[in-house]
Image (cartoon, rainbow, N blue to C red):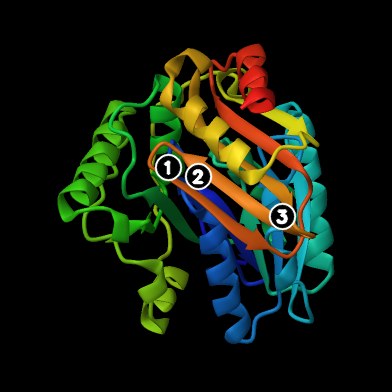
Amino acid sequence: MDICLQMGYTVFHREGCLWYRSISSPGLGSGKTTFLRKYVQYLIQQGHNVCILENDFGAVNVDAMLLQDLIGERCDIETISGGCDCDTHQRRMRTKLISMAMRGFDRVVIEPSGIFDVDEFYDILRDEPLDRWYALGNVVAIVGARLEDKLSPQAEYLLASEAASAGLVVMSRAQQASRAQAEAVVAHLNRTLAACRCPRRFGDDVLCKDWAALTDADWERIDRCGWQQTSYVKLHFDEHEAFTSLYFLELGRTAEQLQRAARTLLQDAKYGHILRIKGFIPDRGGWLELNAARDAMTLQPIPNGQEVLIVIGEGLDKAAIEAVVKRL
């Protein structure tokens, strides 16, 4: 099997495993689900049978809902929701991987949350019988082309650890960034790697291009990028304490009201360091998907959803945030 790492994704084949993870702030809101959709569509076109394993940091796996239309003869989706301790999460992932191997998929694409301990995943692959069924093939790191220049120590560490082994860094939202901004992000990533005493540095192994313009040759490059074995000094901290997800169900708010609330929360530090706001909103018999971060906000129709708003960040003031989303 192959693994494609994108600070946000992982893909396995029975002859290789593709691991993909995505980095934005550090990995939340970087566009990893969009990338996953495009990548899986490419794999299906190449004749692969694909299973997607969606791993979400919080208790509600919103991203999996956005991929339901991919399910068909050559694609299926499994999910793991977070909120549990490391040992429990490893057991859940190990069970899922065993099950998928027995179902005959030749590619398993794993999308971990933007917050995910890379070592936890690598450790699982060393276990019986996974060490015989899966082999690390590709690691792809998705990094936002407008990544914040200053992150918390925990976020800086996640940025470095989740990109360190990548065979390729793929920039998200490259069309929204200048060349100087994209180069500054690569320099930021390399400084962060140096701070973790990691020898890895990125240069030519960065793909900075509008995803709408990616060619078959680009996807082939991504699918054959490989990975690099490296080392870094591990920072020990509880990711569930450093990063928080707040869930608000059935708010009964309109899209305009929630957009206004999102702008308020993202613009004022008193609510905490908010990395991303996402959710589904019922609208005229259909559904809208809201995605908001400091540098962008989108609202687009989707076929299915669940009325929920999720706020993800560090040091969040739950009471103050709840007051905003229920009032504005």
Residue wearing tag 3 = 64
x and y, in percent, of residue 311 in the image: 61, 31
**Which amino acid type is marked by label 3?**
Ala
Q: For the N terminus, which image quadrant?
A: bottom right
Decide which of 143, 168 is in the foreground and name it. 143
Residue drawn at (22%, 60%) of the image: 204
Of callouts 2 and 1, which one flags the residue occurring earlier in the amino acid sequence?
Answer: 1
**Are the two marked residues, 2 and 1, in contact with CB atoms closer than 8 angstroms?**
yes
Circle 3 packing at 10 Å, graded few (<14), some (14-19), many (20+), is some
Residue wearing tag 1 = 24
Residue wearing tag 2 = 29
Q: For the C terminus, which image quadrant?
A: top right
x and y, in percent, of residue 281 in the image: 71, 47
User: Is residue 301 placed above or below 260 in the rendered structure?
Assistant: below
Residue drawn at (42%, 48%) of the image: 165
Direction left: furthest residue: 180
